[in-house]
């Protein structure tokens, strides 16, 4: 790789051991992918240091101890516990304390402790053509697609990129990879944000790591709809970029999106295709559930307003566990707007920093024995997100009941599962 004098200085240790370690990792990554050089990045969304693993937290503490500092604005991804409100989720206190240690390390490094998979709703909004890095697939696809920034699906290298302000030039940082590969014709009206999530999940399974170009929406998708669709595309496939001509930058037409290439496939999506995703994730025939969850990806302020309006003056059915997950920043905005009071008065639990698939519920991890983490028995979770449904099934290893947001809230209010279309 061709490095600048500044980058060579980092690699040789002239700017300290932290940057040297980070640059060594980034050079190794760049060589593996044939990158000719580095690019300067303007933003990083980085690893939290997951409290289920002591060594993971200690890794962040070790970086902070050798004076690692973020060279660019950096937000922190979702964690294993709500640090302030851990009792709401039944998390072990030791888990919350360990997660707080990771937060302390991030504060020392200059990271913004957002602990969310939707940092853009918390004000981290990288603009068009900004090179960036992200450990979270939902952040990658939203920033690539909706904002026009440039990011790959990164792992821990996102931390190293944040520390140096550099990233190897490959993948979606290159113009030639930011072109459509599949044409998707949406031949059915989409009635809710969850419908967009189901659409994304269906298309992601078909296109794999391709770049779908969507046509035929009956109306311009909202930001929440684009967020839900992107998260689902990144869950069922390896999609890191989608294009909606006239909506996502910089493509005004499908012809521009394909840049003279013929699509590998044209996919027509019908109502039956969307409904099939709901059916795929409704695996509990008797409708029994233990938790109702909305807020995946972490809820936006607009979604919090919608939840509050639907719950205003009403009460969650006795004994029903209803989770709303969002970022710290949006939770604070909801509190200042008076929404939090209405939500909590209904009996809803408003949780930040984590979510069902990222907390102590997961059965596919091996937490540090000293934490005493024992996943509770969960038979089924009601969700309004195809992403959450996929990971609940895979990580908590229980049944799922996918429905719309309005129906999920009615489920929590009635104590009985309400399937999609069951609320006028």
Image (cartoon, rainbow, N blue to C red):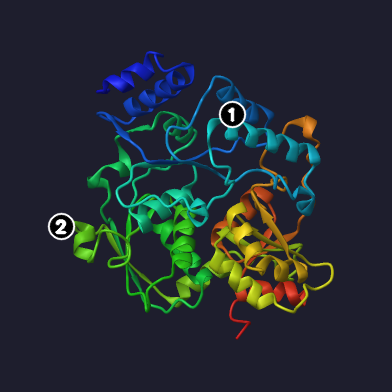
Q: Secondary structure at mark 2?
A: loop
Depth check: give the residue in front, 354 or 188: 354
Residue 404 in the figure: left or right of residue 345: left
Check disc 2 and report the residue beneath it: 260
Question: Which of the numbered marks, if any, corresponds to residue 60?
Answer: 1
Residue drawn where x is 25% and y is 53% of the image: 179
Q: Secondary structure at mark 1?
A: helix
Residue 92 in the figure: left or right of residue 185: right
Q: Residue furthest bottom?
A: 424
Q: Position of residue 225 (x, y in %)?
A: 46, 67
Q: Residue furthest front?
A: 336
Residue drawn where x is 76% and y is 52% of the image: 89
Q: Residue furthest left?
A: 260
Q: Residues within 10 Å of mark 2 (few under 14, many from 20)?
A: few
Please indicate, yes or no, whether residue 418 appears anywhere in the rendered image: no
Q: Position of residue 90 (x, y in %)?
A: 80, 50
Residue 401 in the figure: left or right of residue 128: right
Q: Earlier in the sequence, mark 2 or mark 1?
A: 1
Residue 245, compared with residue 395, is above or below; it is below
Alpha carbons under labels 2 and 1: distance apart: 46 Å
Quadrant of res 292 = bottom right
Q: Position of residue 168 (x, y in %)?
A: 33, 32
Q: Residues within 10 Å of mark 1 (few under 14, many from 20)?
A: many
């Amino acid at each position: 790789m061709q490095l600048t004098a500044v980058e060579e200085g980092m690699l040789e240790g002239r700017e300290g051991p932290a940057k040297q370690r980070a640059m060594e990792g980034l050079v190794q990554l760049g060589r593996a992918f044939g990158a000719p050089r580095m690019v300067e990045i303007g933003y990083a969304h980085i690893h939290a240091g997951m409290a289920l693993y002591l060594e993971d937290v200690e890794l962040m503490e070790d970086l902070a101890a050798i004076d690692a500092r973020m060279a660019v604005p950096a937000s922190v991804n979702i964690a294993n516990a709500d640090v302030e409100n851990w009792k709401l989720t039944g998390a072990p206190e030791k888990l919350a304390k360990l997660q707080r240690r990771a937060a302390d390390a991030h504060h020392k490094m200059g990271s913004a402790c957002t602990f969310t998979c939707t940092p853009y709703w918390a004000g981290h909004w990288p603009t068009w053509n900004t090179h960036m890095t992200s450990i979270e697939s939902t952040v990658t696809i939203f920033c690539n697609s909706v904002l026009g920034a440039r990011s790959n699906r990164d792992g821990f290298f996102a931390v190293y990129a944040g520390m140096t302000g550099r990233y190897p030039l490959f993948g979606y940082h290159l113009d030639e990879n930011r072109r459509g590969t599949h044409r998707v014709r949406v031949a059915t009206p989409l009635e809710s944000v969850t419908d967009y999530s189901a659409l994304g999940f269906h298309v992601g399974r078909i296109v794999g790591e391709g770049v779908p170009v969507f046509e035929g929406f009956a109306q311009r998708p909202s930001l929440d709809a684009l967020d839900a669709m992107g998260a689902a595309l990144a869950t069922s496939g390896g999609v890191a970029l989608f294009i909606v001509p006239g909506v996502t930058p910089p493509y005004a037409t499908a012809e521009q999106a394909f840049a003279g290439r013929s699509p590998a496939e044209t996919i027509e999506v019908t109502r039956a295709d969307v409904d099939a995703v709901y059916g795929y994730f409704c695996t509990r025939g008797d409708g029994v559930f233990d938790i109702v969850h909305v807020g995946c990806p972490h809820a936006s302020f607009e979604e919090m307003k919608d939840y509050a309006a639907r719950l205003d003056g009403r009460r969650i059915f006795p004994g029903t566990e209803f989770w709303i997950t969002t970022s710290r920043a949006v939770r604070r905005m909801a509190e200042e707007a008076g929404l939090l009071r209405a939500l909590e008065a209904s009996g809803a639990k408003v949780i930040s920093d984590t979510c069902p698939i990222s907390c102590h519920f997961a059965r596919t991890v091996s937490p540090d024995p000293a934490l005493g983490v024992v996943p509770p028995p969960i038979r089924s979770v009601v969700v309004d997100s195809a992403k959450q449904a996929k990971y609940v099934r895979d990580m908590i290893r229980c049944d799922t009941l996918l429905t719309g947001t309005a129906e999920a809230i009615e489920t929590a209010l009635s104590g009985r599962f309400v399937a999609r279309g069951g609320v006028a």
